[in-house]
Amino acid sequence: MPPKILLGLSDLTSLHLFFNLELGWPTVHGPVFESLARTDWSIKKISRFKQFLETRQFEQKYRIRPMNQVAQKLQRLVIPKLLGGNLTVLQSHLGTSLLNRMPSHGLFFEDTGERGYRIDRMLWQIRHTLWFHRTCCVLFGEFTNGLEPSGENFMLSALRRFAKDLEILNIPVFYGLPCGHGSGYGLLPLGQSAEILASNRGHFILVRWPQ
């Protein structure tokens, strides 16, 4: 029988951090089991998710898009340890002992229900912490349901401003991971390494489970 695994998203970000940093166990950011009942899931997506649950085997290349000049020039990057999850939950852990011994890492962020100004505030708080100083790259997943009362969307503007600033630190920033609260629901292994590759078709991140 395949070993048990922590799989989930949103508030489970706290458990991902604990498993990844305190126990040294990898986890998977992804949909919970009840998501199989979603009407917008294709048969292919359901079959792929079901196969992962049954075999615990997974390998995927996700297309990602450069968000700053450092990312555009990147040809290859091995991420020693990919960490992250829900941006709001991650922010709540700043200043705690959980983040005191961060290894070299890549950061993944996603969120839902947060307007642009709140996303901007959270990112800049994280940017000015010691936790961020060992970050080798930033990957943005899905940011959903954060429109202004007027219907305008300032979420992407906040991400772009953040990405532009990180050029000073020579940190590449990418977006477009189909992971989060949207319809993508991609599986993303955390607490282990990943690889970003450039090709004539663009940039991709290669993730696999197990390693």
Image: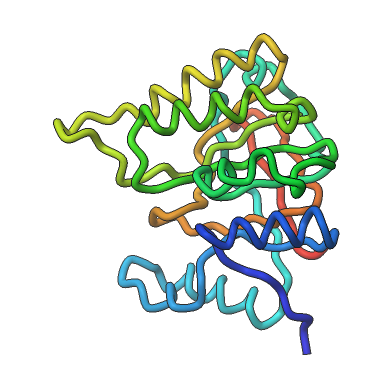
Q: Position of residue 64 (x, y in %)?
A: 57, 36
Q: Is residue 58 left or right of residue 183?
A: right
Q: Is residue 59 left or right of residue 109?
A: right
Q: Residue furthest bottom?
A: 1
Residue found at x 54% / y 30%: 65
Residue found at x 68% / y 39%: 95
Q: Position of residue 18 (x, y in %)?
A: 73, 59
Residue 211 in view: no
Numbered marks: total: 0
Q: Quadrant of the N terminus?
A: bottom right
Q: Position of residue 126 (x, y in %)?
A: 61, 30
Q: Position of residue 189 (x, y in %)?
A: 69, 57
Q: Is residue 40 left or right of residue 204?
A: left
Q: Residue furthest left?
A: 150
Residue found at x 36% / y 41%: 114
Q: Nearer the viewer, residue 17 or 97?
A: 97
Quarter-wise, where is residue 49 in the image?
bottom right
Q: Nearer the viewer, residue 59 or 94?
A: 94
Q: Quadrant of the C terminus?
A: bottom right
